[in-house]
Image (cartoon, rainbow, N blue to C red):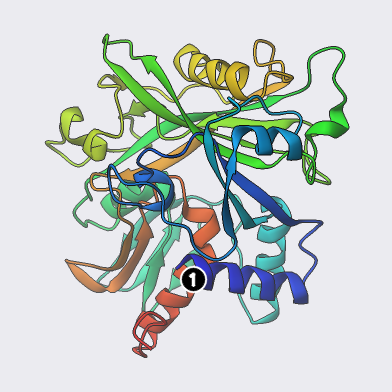
Amino acid sequence: MVIRSVQLWQDLQAEEDCGEHGRSPLLYPNQTLELKEIKKAHRGETMRLRDGQRRLTGREARAQFPGLRISAEKECVLDEQTLCLSANHCLHALQDRAKRHGAVFYHGEQVVRIDRERKVLLTDEGSSVEYSSLVLTAGPWTNRTLASATLRCLPLFVSAEQVHYLVPKPGHDLADFSLGKLPVVAGRVGLTTPGGVSTEFLVYTVPILPGGKEAVKCATHAQGELMSTPEFQLKPGSATSEMGGGRFFRRGLRTSQPGHDELDEFQHKIVSYFVEKVVPGLDAARPKLVCRCLYTNTEDGEFVVGPHPQDPDVLLATGFNGEGFKFAPVVGECLACLLYTSPSPRDS
């Protein structure tokens, strides 16, 4: 799916205005340990390389990227085929293409009811949309939308992740953390959870991109607060101990959504510790900007794509566990194949 998705994003970029973007090296520091969440390598095995990847010592990585701090003898893996995209530009490009093919958008309208018997979708602004087949890509609002269609909820749970945008400490040049001078970094940091359990957390950083926020994006993956609210509904009977198959260490449920810029100290602590160890020139103590990003998670970490078991005319694409955007083109291609009953790209 990754290869096909990259091909489709590149096709879009060749035809539409997707803003400036390009390839950036992706560095896995100190990665002789298991990489299940990063590259699906087998647990306990050294990462097997593919085309475009090579091994570096920490000393070699620091020579190529002076802004990094990595122990000289530690082994790293560098992937030189990573694609950086501007999400806003890509979404606008996709909308423009859809409009040219006849798509109609109802901006700012909320679905309040789906009448599956009459095959009509109703919004809070009074719009009525007839359908023969319905594709729901409602993200964290999936279960609320299913309830409006009198369909069973799915075992999904929503987490409020936190993205930090960091600028350099005094004495460091902003340009040294831009695309081309700093790689994308994905690594692990060991900390003790609020419950007293010592564990490792995945953290990533993205260099400053042209046309972006003039700051390095940094976040931990899948460690946000879990929520149960009227907006983000859980399947009845869901237990927090079952959520995420062990990926999440937080067991409490928030009954309200955090503010868009509300600081979560737990995620900030993880990010700060990683940055201080790996990219010490960044000022993690004083983020330029903090914002929330909602993940729609499944219990096993797998995507949900296909017809709802109660209605074959309702197709779902949800539960992407924080990876939905990068796979959007290939998921859309799969949905089109399901709608028109042709073989899927994976089968052909």
- Quadrant of res 18: bottom right
Pick the front one: 186 or 304: 186
The answer to whether residue 223 of the structure is visible from this angle is yes
On screen, residue 117 above or below 281: below
Pick the front one: 37 or 16: 37
Q: Quadrant of the N terminus?
A: bottom left
Q: Which residue corresponds to the image point at 20% horizontal and 42% vertical from the top-left?
A: 235
On screen, residue 80 above or below 219: below
- Quadrant of res 182: top right
Percent coordinates x, y for residue 269 in the rendering = 50, 13
According to the picture, the residue beneath numbered tag 1 turns out to be: 330
The furthest residue to the front: 73
Percent coordinates x, y for residue 88 in the rendering = 70, 51
The answer to whether residue 127 of the structure is visible from this angle is no
Percent coordinates x, y for residue 174 in the rendering = 85, 28
On screen, residue 280 above or below 122: above
Q: Amino acid at mark 1?
A: Val
* Residue 55 left/right relative to 227: right
Q: Which residue corresponds to the image point at 32% horizontal and 10% vertical from the top-left?
A: 194
Q: Secondary structure at mark 1?
A: helix
Q: Which residue corresponds to the image point at 43% horizontal and 46% vertical from the top-left?
A: 38
Pick the front one: 274 or 141: 274
- Quadrant of res 238: top left
* Residue 140 left/right relative to 64: left
Q: Quadrant of the C terminus?
A: bottom left
Percent coordinates x, y for residue 138 in the rendering = 43, 53
Q: Which residue corresponds to the image point at 24% horizontal and 33% vertical from the top-left?
A: 246
* Residue 175 left/right relative to 59: right
Pick the front one: 228 or 40: 40
